[in-house]
């Protein structure tokens, strides 16, 4: 079976931690445009929110629940060339809360 060597895994996966602002927040420094972003609040309980480029922004999956796809218009609102933008939704950008986003 043929395979390729990935010289720099950060070109394909990177973690971004951030503090919520409560207003639209463009997050950069990922190093590439993600196609899949998984966001989780770090400082308290909250849902895992998964977004992908196929479904499009504002469409989320909850990996820790039984809900199907959900439209979250204030969740992840854009995939950018070096990261992503989150809206005002508290589960992805509540003011002063801390978050982690895993990006592929």
Image (spheres, grey):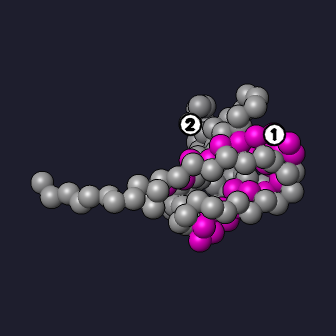
In the figure, is residue 56 to the left or right of 18? left
Q: Secondary structure at mark 1?
A: loop
- In this view, the residue in front, 62 or 69, is 62
Give the class, few, some or many, for how many residues have Cα within 10 Å of label 1's Cα (few <14, many ≥20): some
Local secondary structure at mark 2:
loop
Where residue 34 appears, as percent x and y from the top left, is: 54, 61
Q: Looking at this rendering, what residue extends furthest in the front direction? A: 7
**Could you say which is closer to the camera, residue 11 or residue 33?**
11
Q: Residue at 45% x, 61% y: name it.
A: 11
Query: Label 1 vs label 2: CA separation?
Result: 20 Å
Q: Which labelled disc corresponds to residue 62?
A: none
Residue 73 within the segment the image draws in magenta: no
Rendered location of residue 5, percent (x, y)? 26, 58
Q: At 76% from the left edge and 31% from the top edge, which residue is drawn?
A: 43
Near-viewer residue (99 or 71): 99
In the shown orientation, is residue 69 left or right of residue 1? right
Residue 63's disc is: 2
Quarter of the image holding residue 29?
Answer: bottom right
Residues in magenta, as a range: 76-104
Q: Tell me the tag on residue 97.
A: 1
Q: Is residue 48 above or below residue 35?
A: above
In the image, taking residue 6 as reference, residue 34 lies left or right, namely right
> Quadrant location of residue 74?
bottom right
Q: Position of residue 53 (x, y in %)?
A: 54, 62
* Residue 69 appears in the rendering: no
Q: Decide which of tag 1 and tag 2 comes sooner along the chain.
A: 2
For the point 53% across and 52% down, the residue is 14
Q: Decide: is 19 above or below 63.
A: below
Residue at (67, 46) in percent of width and height = 17
Specify the quadrant that holds the N terminus: bottom left
């Amino acid at each position: 079976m043929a395979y390729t060597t990935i010289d720099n895994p950060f070109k394909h996966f990177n973690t971004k931690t951030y503090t919520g602002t409560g207003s639209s927040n463009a997050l950069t420094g990922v190093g590439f445009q993600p196609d899949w972003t998984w966001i989780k609040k770090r400082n308290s309980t909250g849902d895992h929110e998964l977004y992908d480029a196929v479904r499009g922004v504002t469409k989320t999956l909850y990996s820790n629940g039984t809900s199907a796809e959900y439209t979250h218009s204030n969740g992840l609102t854009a995939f950018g060339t070096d990261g992503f933008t989150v809206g005002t939704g508290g589960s992805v950008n509540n003011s002063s809360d801390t978050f982690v986003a895993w990006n592929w």
